[in-house]
Amino acid sequence: DGGITQSPKYLFRKEGQNVTLSCEQNLNHDAMYWYRQDPGQGLRLIYYSQIVNDFQKGDIAEGYSVSREKKESFPLTVTSAQKNPTAFYLCATRLNTEAFFGQGTRLTVV
Amino acid sequence: AQKITQTQPGMFVQEKEAVTLDCTYDTSDQSYGLFWYKQPSSGEMIFLIYQGSYDEQNATEGRYSLNFQKARKSANLVISASQLGDSAMYFCAMSRLGQGGSEKLVFGKGTKLTVNP
């Protein structure tokens, strides 16, 4: 099946720990994006990448890091510097007029 | 700065009626794209429709159509013959040039649509 896989679906993290959210795609799309969604809010862009080994900061990149070593993969690391990491995280890909999302990862800091 | 504005936090519509969800955008780019997504309570984002800035015809996909008024910078979503399953959050998004020539995809805050039986 072609699609975007985010894992895990639910993630719990202790304060002060880094955690990495996985995003894998087999759509052969060039562009990939990470968003954060808080309850009742829209999607805010964290990082985006157009090609391998290149990525740009979005509107709320502080406390997050990414890598794009392969076209298929765009993992997001939530670092201990992120003050309020509890949120729903969505990964998306895009090729021209098509843009699709994964199922999301719900991160909770305990 | 917010580039996509959805002014209706919530909308109600009777089943089988049509509803229009508003979206205005702000860009100085000549080339851009506009998207609409549906997000049910399950959280998944479902792609509905796309309109390119150079497309002269309004996009349509089944019961969804996009009322694109370029001069007014609006891209309203029209849902015809509403169904109970249409109850969800709806997001308008725009692709525009970001750093290094990459295209950003930015979203509005969404409109919660409730379809009443």
Image (cartoon, coloured by chain):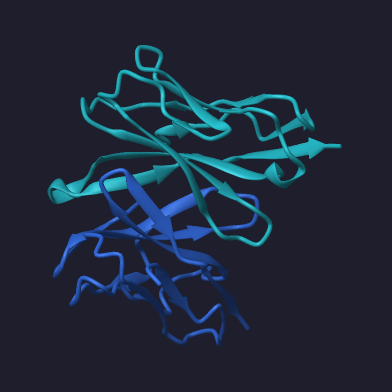
Chain colours: A blue, B cyan
* Residue beneath the point at 71% across and 33% down: B82
* Residue beneath the point at 69% across and 29% down: B81
Q: Quadrant of the N terminus of chain A?
A: bottom left
The percent coordinates of residue A59 (x first, y second) are 36, 51
Question: Horizontally, is B14 left or right of B103 in the view?
Answer: right
Specify whether residue A63 is in view.
Answer: yes
For this rendering, which residue is in front, B55 or B4?
B55
The percent coordinates of residue B112 (x first, y second) are 68, 40
**Residue reaching furthest top?**
B71
The percent coordinates of residue A40 (x first, y second) are 65, 50
Q: Quadrant of the C terminus of chain A?
A: bottom right
Locate residue A77: give its quadrant. Answer: bottom left
Question: Horizontally, is B66 left or right of A45 in the view?
Answer: right
For this rendering, which residue is in front, A13 or A25?
A25
Q: How many marks?
A: 0
In the image, is residue A59 above or below residue A18? above
In the image, is residue B94 above or below residue A25? above
The percent coordinates of residue A90 (x first, y second) are 47, 63
